């Protein structure tokens, strides 16, 4: 009986520790804009400016305003619709304003320097934001570069693959447009 109780408490402790670590990882994966918009003791106004859509991913500029202090923060927001046999879900990722130039520069380098190459092995090239959003390309079994954006770090359903080179170019154009809408 004592072994069963000890085992139960041990399992409970592991579960709590695992859950605590999960919450800590989620907080570490938040963008600065998300942290700003979730600050306790504030009155936050959220404005979403539509930029464009690629596939099932909507791109917006999110402007967060603390109505009490007047402070503002902005970010690029990606909203991906995901469908499965169990139903639909919406995946959301946020890229801080100070990371936008890095993403645009990375995508242009991919376009100019990576796409012209031929890889001999499976190869990935990616940009990762502090909030966990990633974008890049990979050399696949079909012997060509495939491009993507992944809205949520730990969610395989949050991938948006670009089916055409035009989609990749439009993605860069949308990001440049978003940059003009940032505060």
Image: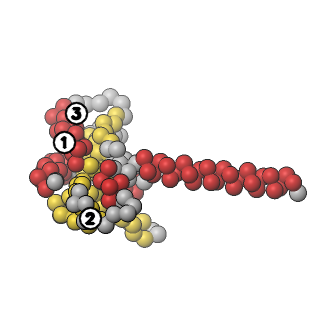
Q: Measure the C-alpha gap from mark 1 to mark 2.
A: 30 Å
* Picture residue at 29% right of the left edge, 65% below the top: 44
Image depth: mark 2 or mark 3 in front:
2
Say if mark 1 contacts mark 2, CB within 8 Å. no
Image depth: mark 3 or mark 1 in front:
1
User: Measured from the top left, where is residue 5 in percent x and y?
Assistant: 81, 56
User: Measured from the top left, where is residue 105 in percent x and y?
Assistant: 18, 38
Question: Helix, strand or loop at disc 3?
Answer: helix
113 horizontally vs 56: left or right? left
- Answer with mark 2 or mark 3, whichever residue precedes in sequence: 2
Q: Measure the C-alpha gap from mark 3 to mark 1.
A: 19 Å
Question: Helix, strand or loop at disc 1?
Answer: helix
Above or below, 183 against 114 in this view is: below
Above or below, 64 against 114 in this view is: below
Say if mark 3 contacts mark 1, CB within 8 Å. no
Crowd class of label 3 (few under 14; some 14 to 19; many from 20; radius 10 Å): some
| Residue under pointer 3 | 114
- Answer with mark 1 or mark 2, whichever residue precedes in sequence: 2
Q: Measure the C-alpha gap from mark 2 to mark 3.
A: 47 Å
Look at the image and tell me in which quarter the C terminus lies.
bottom left
| Residue under pointer 1 | 101
The residue nearer to you, when weighing 79 against 149, is 79
The residue nearer to you, when weighing 27 against 68, is 68
* Picture residue at 34% right of the left edge, 44% below the top: 130
| Residue under pointer 2 | 68
Crowd class of label 2 (few under 14; some 14 to 19; many from 20; radius 10 Å): few
């Amino acid at each position: 009986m004592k072994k069963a109780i000890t085992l139960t408490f041990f399992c409970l402790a592991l579960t709590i520790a695992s859950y605590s670590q999960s919450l800590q990882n989620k907080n570490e994966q938040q963008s600065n804009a998300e942290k700003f918009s979730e600050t306790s003791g504030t009155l936050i106004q959220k404005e979403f400016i539509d930029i464009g859509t690629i596939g099932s991913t909507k791109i917006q500029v999110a402007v967060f305003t603390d109505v009490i202090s007047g402070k503002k923060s902005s970010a690029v927001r990606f909203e991906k619709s995901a469908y499965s046999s169990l139903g639909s879900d919406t995946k959301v990722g946020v890229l801080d304003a100070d990371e936008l130039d890095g993403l645009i520069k990375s995508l242009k380098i991919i376009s100019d320097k990576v796409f012209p190459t031929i890889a001999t092995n499976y190869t990935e090239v990616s940009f990762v934001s502090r909030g966990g959003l990633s974008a890049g390309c990979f050399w696949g079994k079909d012997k060509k570069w495939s491009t993507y954006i992944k809205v949520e770090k730990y969610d395989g359903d949050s991938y948006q693959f670009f089916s055409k080179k035009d989609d990749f170019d439009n993605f860069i154009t949308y990001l440049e447009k978003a940059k003009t809408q940032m505060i």
